Image (tube, rainbow, N blue to C red):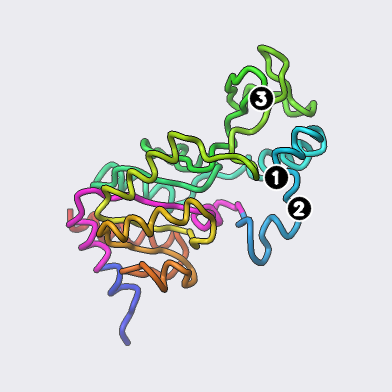
Amino acid sequence: MVNLLEINLKKAVNAILEAKHITAFTGAGISVESGIPSYRGEGGLWTKYDTKVLELNYFYSNPKDSWEIIREIFYDYFGKAKPNPAHFALAELEKKSNLKAIITQNIDNLHYEAGSKTVFEFHGNSKVMLCTKCGKKHKVENVNLDKLPPKCSYCKGLLKPDFIFFGEGIPQDAYKNSFAEAEKADLFILIGVTGLVEPAASIPRIAKQKGATIIEINPQRTTYTETITDIFLQGKAGEVMTQLNEMLFDEL
């Protein structure tokens, strides 16, 4: 019986070996194995919580109410998450191949914790707090979340997690660098992304238009699979990335 995954893994290894500029593009699916659920779909966060807590206007009008839910989701719950084999595999790939950058829609900081160096956080980072008054940034470990809403230690202004709320623009540097990667990469590796959240969803499509080969790793087929993917590796991110690296490093 033909093992389709093994065949496609070999194709992926060859594509990586031939590529001059590789970019990885990750979404919620890569962090599921770290215990972080996706936001949408069955069992997603927004089936349990009201999205209004992350609407910018609501946050400013009701900071304490918003912060109670934000703390519960992103700090009491997500704060315990650790990188999984997929995060570590990407960090290793960065060291040993032509992987130049990771673009992530995730805000969990797990790529950095796994050892990746060049990460463009399209939606920001939950491990950083931004003062809405003076603009000072604080590491979350230096902020007291026992008393809500938290205040800036410099000016006593309201602190906000430094990730994108509904109604807020993408960070300029992350936006510029991510779309630049789409212009110059000859290989894009999609991991745990479904292509439903714009403007991030456009990045791999632009890469495809510019001639990049698209490798996709997901448990199920997505809009990308049906439109731009060249090599589809079906399975959990950690398992597939571990297999991919083992085969790749045997060739190096």
Mark 2 highlights which residue?
A: 49
Q: Alpha-carbon distance for marks 2 and 3? A: 24 Å
Contact between marks 2 and 3 (CB within 8 A): the answer is no
| Front position in the image: 26 or 202 | 202
What amino acid does circle 3 point to?
Thr
Contact between marks 1 and 3 (CB within 8 A): the answer is no
Q: Residue 73's mark? A: 1
Residue 203: percent from left, percent from top: 40, 53
Residue 78: percent from left, percent from top: 64, 44
Contact between marks 2 and 1 (CB within 8 A): the answer is yes
Q: Is residue 211 magenta?
A: no
Mark 3 highlights which residue?
A: 132
* Dot in front, 2 or 3: 3
For marks 1 and 3, the one nearer the N-term is 1
Residue drawn at (40%, 47%), measured in percent from left and top? 88
Decide if residue 219 is on the left or right side of residue 228: right
Residue 219: percent from left, percent from top: 48, 68
Q: Residues within 10 Å of mark 1 (few under 14, many from 20)?
A: some
Decide if residue 127 is on the left or right side of residue 101: right
Q: Residues within 10 Å of mark 3 (few under 14, many from 20)?
A: some
What amino acid does circle 1 point to?
Ile
Q: Alpha-carbon distance for marks 2 and 1? A: 9 Å
Vertical arrangement, residue 28 with respect to residue 75, above or below: below
Report whether residue 97 is seen.
no
Residue 178 found in image quarter: top left
Decide if residue 178 is on the left or right side of residue 37: left
